Amino acid sequence: MKGSATIETIYLDMTERTEICISSDALRKMPKLRLLAFANHNGYGQKRVDYTLSLPTNLELPNDLRYIQWDGCPLKSLSTTSWPSKLVELSMPYSDLEKLWDEPLNFPSLELIYLASSKQMIECPDLSGAPNLKEVWVNGCDKLTHLHPSILSLPKLSGLCVFGCTELKSLSCTTCSPSLRDVVAYNCPNLQEFSIPISKDNSHINLHLRSTALKQLPSSIAHLQNLDNFSFPINDLLMDLPEKFTNQIILSDPDNHECDTVATLSTILPSPMFHYLKELKFDRCPSLTELPDNISLLSSLLLITIHDTNIMTFPESIKNFPRLKLLFICHCERLQLVPELPPSLQAFKAWDCKSLRTVSSSREQLKRQQGTTFAFLNCVKLEEESCFTILKDSIVRAEAQQLSPRLEENRNEEFIDDYGDSFLSEHDVSVGKVCYFLPIRGSKLDDLFHHCSSQNSISIQLPLSSNFSGFIFYLVVPPIQPCDKGDIEMSFGFECYLETSWGQRIHKASSCSLRWRNCVYIGFQMNLLSDHVLLWYDSQCCKQIMEIIRGRKAIDDDDQNSNLEVKFFARLPNKEEVVIKECGIRWIYTNMEKDSRGCRFKRSRQVFELEEKGLESDDAGEELVPPAKKFKHSLMEVESVENLRKKLEQLLHIQFDGGFLSAEIKLGYNV
């Protein structure tokens, strides 16, 4: 190959290619080659596209090669290959490898081995010749029965991932790497021995042993404290762990299927280890049919995640959690009812809970939050009344936040001190935003919003009312097919243009995203089974636009109302645009805070129309705008005392026999 001596990178996309032939010395003739990649970009857990690769039995590689990526490598062994001594990363997922090599080889620079889903691999060899090795990934290697003890003794090893190795029976070594931070060995149903002598000085690790066959709590971990994350089957043995053993725990079904999972859980929850727990997760617990009432004893809990269980509802005591911020439920297909939730909750996500019908309102104990995210993805049996209740709750939250100007300054210091300010942002709860996402039921959106459009954009005039203080948006997206690429995520947003009567065109933008970032969700697909509505409020965007409007009105009281043009978008993880079937806007008025919540939604359109006209309601003699505010607003529209008198007579239906001052005294208004 002409110029091959200067080639530093070879990258071949094997997704489309079906045949390639390499001679034994073709790569050796490229002494400057640093990166070699035969890549395939199918999604997680997908079988690689078959291709024909003709290779010699004695493949020679240049000594300066640093990185090898070979997706779906067809070789059975790498023993006959001439390996470069400067190799840093070896990545061969979905390969046909049965073993790497027969004898220990020297790789002084090797830092990572990635052999995930190599279904034929039966052993992982002696790696003592790789003293700088930091990570070994052999997850999903179905036939792997054991690992060489040298791996866990390597001085710089920080991570070992063997999850999904269904035939793995043992993890053991005589000495443990002082650098060890992650041992991920869940979903190994034949793992019966775990004997890794982890030092007490090395406690800040992630240790995942759930969904295994371990019948005893490993003695090598009982003395540890302050684990970052720990997972284990639901078992009475957990009562023996000390307090402050871990901040986070993930529980799976017990290995003993005759065990009463609910009773066992009720027994272990009062134990010391759970007292200081911040995050509690359940992963693949089909025998868990309910959560015991005494779960409310976990007063330090900030997050609960429930995945793949058979619970049908939550205990009423869940509303008593004093500090719970996040509640995530995934693939709990028997769940039918969500009761009143704790007022501290800032994010609730239910995904593929296909029997969920009823969601109770939490408005009576609603706290004003910095931001909230509530999502009911593919909860296709939600009753129409529950959907309406959820939407009303979202509007109450948005209006409460807009009508509390100091809300963003009043940070929850206790929460921040305990877990860091980044905790909520990691779970996509944005400060200053209210986001609700749920299946759409019925046609009640018209009752909740002042303007609606059947397109992806809307252009409207902002209200003239002095009580106007902000706005809430919504949009509707149709069903989408499963999407494999990227994170489990959907992004939403809008481009907003404020056209003022004095000739300015001001651009503002807002966006939000709904993500399911969690170790129990690996391998799932983003999809929508029916039409879903997204409602969101952005306090920062509202604040900026309202400051512009109020600033102008302070200069010119006769200024006309401004026009607002909003164009919405929605995108899948692969950046594909989603069709928007409908969108709309709801105005927020300061006087709404004084209305009863029962009237707020039923009469929202009347409020809007009457605010624009400056008139009073005839409904049961009830005024939608307080008389004092109407009186003040009227004064701005008159230019003389005579006009003022006539206006007051029209509004208040009385005759004046005195001047302006006497009218003020009689009516009791501070004009």
Image: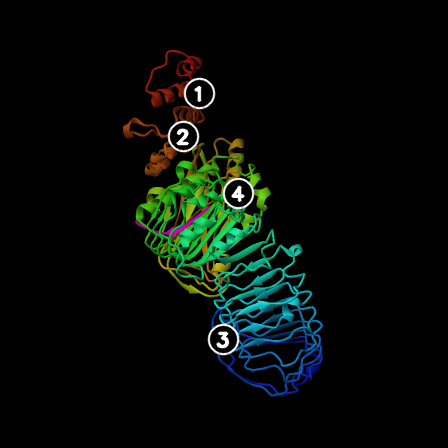
Q: Are marks 1 and 4 in contact (CB under 8 Å)?
A: no
CA distance separating discs 2 and 1: 32 Å
Amino acid of disc 1:
Ser
Q: Nearer the viewer, residue 593 or 22?
A: 22
**Is 91 left, or right, of 7 in this rendering?**
left
Question: Which label belongs to residue 594?
Answer: 2
Residue at numbered disc 4: 540
Position of the N terminus by quadrant = bottom right
Looking at marks 1 and 4 on the same chain, the residue that comes earlier in the sequence is marked by 4
Looking at marks 2 and 3 on the same chain, the residue that comes earlier in the sequence is marked by 3
Whole-percent x and y of residue 429? 51, 48
Residue at numbered disc 1: 640
Amino acid of disc 3:
Arg
Select label 3 or label 4 by which is in front.
Answer: 3
Amino acid of disc 2:
Lys
Residue at numbered disc 3: 48
Looking at marks 2 and 1 on the same chain, the residue that comes earlier in the sequence is marked by 2
Secondary structure of the residue carrying tag 2 is: helix
CA distance separating discs 1 and 3: 82 Å
Q: What number of labels is visible?
A: 4
Label 3 crowd bin: few (<14), some (14–19), many (20+), radius 10 Å: some
Q: Which residues are magenta?
A: 431-445
Whole-percent x and y of residue 174? 65, 66
